[in-house]
Every structure is written in C-alpha cells, then in structure tokens.
Image (cartoon, rainbow, N blue to C red):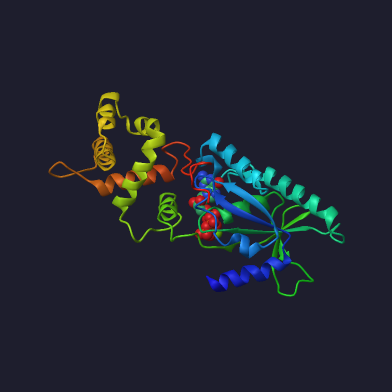
Amino acid sequence: MAKTKRQIIEDLKLIDIVAEIIDSRIPISSQNPDIKEIIKDKKRLIILNKSDLACEKENKKWVTYFENNNISAVLVDSATGKGIKDAINEINEIYDKEKYEEKGRIGKSIRIMILGIPNVGKSSFINRIAKKNTAQVGNKPGVTRQKQWIHVSDKIELLDTPGVLWPKLDNEKIALNLAYTGTIKNDILSITDIGYEFLKLFQKRYLENLKQRYKLNEDEINDILQIEEQREKTLALMALIAKKRGAIISGGEIDYERVANILLEDFKNGKLGRITLETVGDGSQR
Ligand SMILES: Nc1nc2c(ncn2[C@@H]2O[C@H](COP(=O)(O)OP(=O)(O)OP(=O)(O)O)[C@@H](O)[C@H]2O)c(=O)[nH]1
Ligand SMILES: [Mg+2]
C-alpha cells in the first residue's frame, strides 16, 4: 500500500481535481482515512456512487452534509450513467472558480484523477464518464512519465488508472459496513455472524422492508418485537426468515449460515430496497 500511495502522490502532480468515489450506502465507511493528507490542498469532488442502491432522502442529506463541509458532492449511478452529467458540470464549476484565481491555466484542459477504496465503482465511473465522447485514449505529449489520458470533453481529461486506496479497517463498525456492502472480506467474523450483525442493525430502521421481502405477517413479527433482549430478538427474526425461505437443516434445525447468506445477498442486490446504512447525524461522522 505504501508503494501505491507514493504512486498516487506522484500522479497528483499532474492533476487539478481529485474525484473521490464513495459508496452512497456507507458514505463515511467507504472513505479513505488518509485522503486529506494525500491530496493536500487539491480540489476535491465527492462522487456518491451507487446512489441507486441508497435511500433517496438520505442521499440528499449526504450531499448537503458534504457541501456544509465545503466539499462538492454529486449523486451518481454508474450502472446506468445517471448523474454523470452533474459530475461533469460540477467539475467545470470547481475549475471555473479556480481558473480566475490561477493565471496561465486558461485554455488548458482540466485534469481529473479518480481515487477510492476497492469496489466502490471507480472503473464503472471512468467508463461512464469517458463513453460520452467515445473514449479517446492516447498518450499526451509533454508529460515526463507517459500517462494515458482519457478525453472526456473539450475541457476535461481523465487519468486512465484510478488510485486504489485502503479503507479504515481497524474500526469494527466500519469493517462490518464494508463487509455488508461486499467491499472487503471480513476474515475475523463468520458469514453467520456478519449476517446476524447486519440484521441487528437493519431491523431497527428497515423492518418494513424485511416484512415485505420475506412476507412476514403481523402476528409473527409482533411476537418477536415483544422480545426485549437484543440478541434473542435478532436470532428469533433470523429464524423466522429462515423458515420463510426454507433455510432448514434436516431435522428441523435453523440453517443460520444459509439465512445469513440470503440476507447479505439480498442486500447487495438491492432486493431489500434502497438502503442507507450510515445516516447523517448517526454518529458515524467523526
Ligand atoms: N447498482 C450499482 N452498481 C454499481 C455502480 N457502480 C458500480 N457498480 C457495481 O459495483 C461493482 C464494482 O464496480 P467497479 O467499477 O469494478 O469498482 P472498482 O472501484 O473499479 O473496483 P476495484 O477495481 O476492484 O477496486 C460492479 O459489480 C459494478 O457493476 C452503481 O452506481 N450502481
Ligand atoms: Mg476497478
């Protein structure tokens, strides 16, 4: 990772704006903790990617949150290309401000670099933003080290390789969030435990989604909601979902591993609805 970081810092010399791609479902956990130190005073644009999988109301709140912290942010869905135009507009906007401050940059294109932790959609974003102008890839003369630049518009060029940074894994809550979204494999906890932790968190805010997805009826769910002890309650809910889905081992025992897999797969594929796991003001922002 130290080598990658050095490479990024070296590449940054050529860059005007850093676009940091994050996952809209977990906007804090999917940031790189060292980003500020790495990019220093470079202009930064936050791309809240996978916005199609996150709750619309929360998406808007996160944009406001970043803007209140003087960081431009746009909602993007790189799977369909929604929001790509907004990202381009925002890049022009950031640059225009800069242009007046800095002489000699007028007429030159804006150079962008994509940064982000694994699996947030860096490549998808690059493909989307580049496709607009039939991705002209070529060597740019006058750059010491040969770099591939992708022509985005008359004004914007993109470094073809994204900088892959590492998330903050020493915090258990963050590591779990990244395991739920499938960003990292969690080697410490079993799938069953990850599924359990997910359900514990999920049922607090998205009980309706569970009811809908697994066709849980009111009587069944009300009995479970009466249970005071958190662990017991979550396990009862897990067992109920297992029954609905036939995650039963011969002999009638609950197959907890299988139900954990069902829950996590359904979440990853958006089958549980549009979900935001980290909300503004829930204490995830340090
Ligand atoms: N629904 C949805 N899926 C997305 C979006 N962006 C990317 N994906 C999916 O997320 C997964 C990871 O996307 P990539 O573009 O490969 O992510 P990356 O950041 O380049 O990943 P690495 O190169 O492994 O670090 C793929 O399955 C994509 O199809 C999005 O905006 N919405
Ligand atoms: Mg990639």
As displayed, is residue 57 above or below residue 157? above
Q: Residue at x 51, y 40 (%)?
A: 54
Is residue 24 visible from the viewing direction of this image? yes
Q: Residue at x 51, y 37 (%)?
A: 55
In this rendering, the count of numbered labels is 0
As displayed, is residue 282 above or below residue 148? above
Q: Residue 186: give x, y in percent of width and height.
A: 38, 58
As displayed, is residue 171 above or below residue 253? below
Q: Quadrant of ligand 2?
A: bottom right
Q: Residue at x 32, y 29 (%)?
A: 215
Q: Nearer the viewer, residue 255 or 137?
A: 255
The picture quadrant where one finds residue 76 is: top right
Is residue 161 visible from the viewing direction of this image? no
Q: Residue 192: give x, y in percent of width and height.
A: 29, 50
Taking the image as shown, residue 187 lies to the left or right of residue 252, namely right
Taking the image as shown, residue 30 lies to the left or right of residue 246, namely right
Taking the image as shown, residue 230 lies to the left or right of residue 250, namely right
Q: Residue at x 36, y 37 (%)?
A: 203
Q: Which residue, as the protein is rendered here, is positioned at the far left?
A: 251
The picture quadrant where one finds residue 16 is: bottom right
Q: Nearer the viewer, residue 135 or 196?
A: 196
Q: Residue 13: give x, y in percent of width and height.
A: 72, 68
Q: Residue 187: give x, y in percent of width and height.
A: 35, 61
